[in-house]
Image: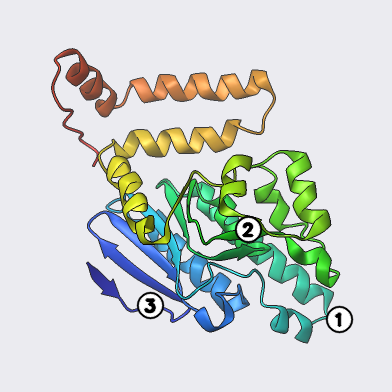
C-alpha cells in the first residue's frame, strides 16, 4: 500500500482501487473541527472525480473513531450565530457527500462514535464495528441536543431507538447498535480489518458502473413515497439494463462463466 501525504487532519492511503481515509486527531478523539470537516470534504471531492477508485473506507487513528464536534472551538464562538450556522451547514454538506459519492463507503469503527461521530458512521453505506465500539448521541448531557447527528442516525434506526439515544444521552455497545440496525457487523477488534476487507473485496469484484447507478438510485428513492420511489427505481432498472456490464453479467450467468466487467 502506498500512502500519500495530505492535510494532517486526514491521512489518505491507497491500495489499488481502494482508498482509506483515516481521521488523524487521535489526541482529541478525532473531533470534527472546522479544519477536519474541510479536510474530509476535500478528500471526498477528489475521490468523487476519480473513476479508478472503486471503494472507500473511513477509519480513525487512536482509541476513538470520532467524538463529534470540537467543543472547545464551538465554545470559542458561542455567541456568534452566523459562525455556528456556517459550522453546521458545512458539516451537513460534508456528511451528505458520503451518500453522493459513486463509490461505496465503509466505516471502520474501532472505538467511541458519539454525536457527529455517530452521525458520520451512519452516513456511510456500511458500518463494520469492533466489539470495543460505542455509539451515543450525548449532546443533551451538555445542553446541546443532537439535532443534526440524528438526521443520519434516525434514518438508520427506528424513531423510538433514536429518541432513546437523544433523550438519555447514554451510549450503547456495538452489539446493541447491531441489533438496532446502526451497524452491519460486529467482530473482535483483532478481526476488524479482515472483516472490512471481506466487504471491500466483494465490492471491488462488482461492476463499478452498476454499483454507482444503484447507489445513487437507492438514496434518491429511499425517503420518498411509494409511487415516486418505484418510478425512480423503474427508470434506474431500465438504464441499468442498457449498460454493457449488464449484458456481460447476464451472458456470463447464462454461460456459467465469470463476468468480465468493462467498468472495473
- Callout 2 secondary element: strand
Determine the CA span between mark 1 and mark 3. Answer: 33 Å
Left or right, 253 with reference to 119? left
Point 76% across, 76% down: residue: 83
In the rendered structure, which disc, 2 or 1, sits on the residue that comes first in sequence?
1
The residue most toward the bottom is: 76
Point 42% across, 19% down: residue: 238
In the rendered structure, which disc, 1 or 3, sits on the residue that comes first in sequence?
3
71 or 134, nearer to the observer: 134
Crowding at dot 3, Cα within 10 Å, few <14 / some 14-19 / many 20+, comes out as few
Tell me, for residue 135, which label it has, or none. Answer: 2
Point 57% across, 78% down: residue: 35
Quarter of the image where the N terminus is located: bottom left
262 or 159, nearer to the observer: 159
- Res 34 visible: yes
Left or right, 78 with reference to 4? right
Q: In this rendering, is residue 5 above or below 197?
A: below
In the rendered structure, which disc, 2 or 3, sits on the residue that comes first in sequence?
3
Tell me, for residue 79, which label it has, or none. Answer: 1
Left or right, 158 with reference to 51? right
> Which residue is identified by label 3?
6
- Residue 190 image offset from top left, x and y in percent: 36, 61
Crowding at dot 2, Cα within 10 Å, few <14 / some 14-19 / many 20+, comes out as many
122 or 213, nearer to the observer: 122
- Callout 1 secondary element: loop
Q: In this rendering, is residue 4 above or below 108?
A: below
Amino acid at each position: 500500500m502506498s500512502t500519500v501525504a495530505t492535510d494532517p487532519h486526514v491521512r489518505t492511503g491507497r491500495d489499488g482501487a481502494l482508498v482509506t481515509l483515516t481521521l488523524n486527531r487521535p489526541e482529541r478523539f478525532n473531533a470534527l473541527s472546522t479544519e477536519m470537516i474541510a479536510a474530509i470534504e476535500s478528500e471526498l471531492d477528489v475521490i468523487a472525480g476519480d473513476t479508478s477508485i472503486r471503494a472507500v473506507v473511513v477509519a480513525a487513528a487512536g482509541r476513538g473513531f470520532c467524538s463529534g464536534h470540537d467543543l472547545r472551538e464551538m465554545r470559542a464562538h458561542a455567541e456568534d450565530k452566523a459562525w455556528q450556522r456556517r459550522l453546521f451547514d458545512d458539516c451537513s454538506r460534508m456528511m451528505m457527500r458520503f451518500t453522493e459519492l459513486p463509490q461505496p463507503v465503509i466505516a471502520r469503527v474501532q472505538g467511541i462514535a458519539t454525536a457527529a461521530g455517530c452521525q458520520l458512521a451512519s452516513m456511510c453505506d456500511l458500518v463494520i464495528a469492533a466489539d470495543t465500539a460505542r455509539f451515543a448521541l450525548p449532546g443533551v448531557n451538555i445542553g446541546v441536543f443532537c439535532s443534526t447527528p440524528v438526521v443520519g442516525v434516525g434514518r438508520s434506526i427506528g424513531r423510538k431507538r433514536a429518541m432513546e439515544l437523544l433523550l438519555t444521552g447514554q451510549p450503547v455497545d456495538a452489539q446493541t447498535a447491531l441489533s438496532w440496525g446502526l451497524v452491519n457487523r460486529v467482530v473482535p477488534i483483532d478481526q476488524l480489518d479482515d472483516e472490512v476487507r471481506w466487504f471491500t473485496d466483494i465490492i471491488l469484484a462488482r461492476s463499478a458502473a452498476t454499483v454507482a447507478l444503484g447507489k445513487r438510485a437507492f438514496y434518491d428513492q429511499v425517503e420518498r413515497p411509494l409511487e415516486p420511489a418505484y418510478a425512480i427505481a423503474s427508470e434506474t432498472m431500465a438504464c441499468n439494463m442498457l449498460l454493457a456490464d449488464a449484458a456481460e453479467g447476464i451472458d456470463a450467468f447464462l454461460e456459467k462463466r465469470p463476468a468480465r466487467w468493462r467498468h472495473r
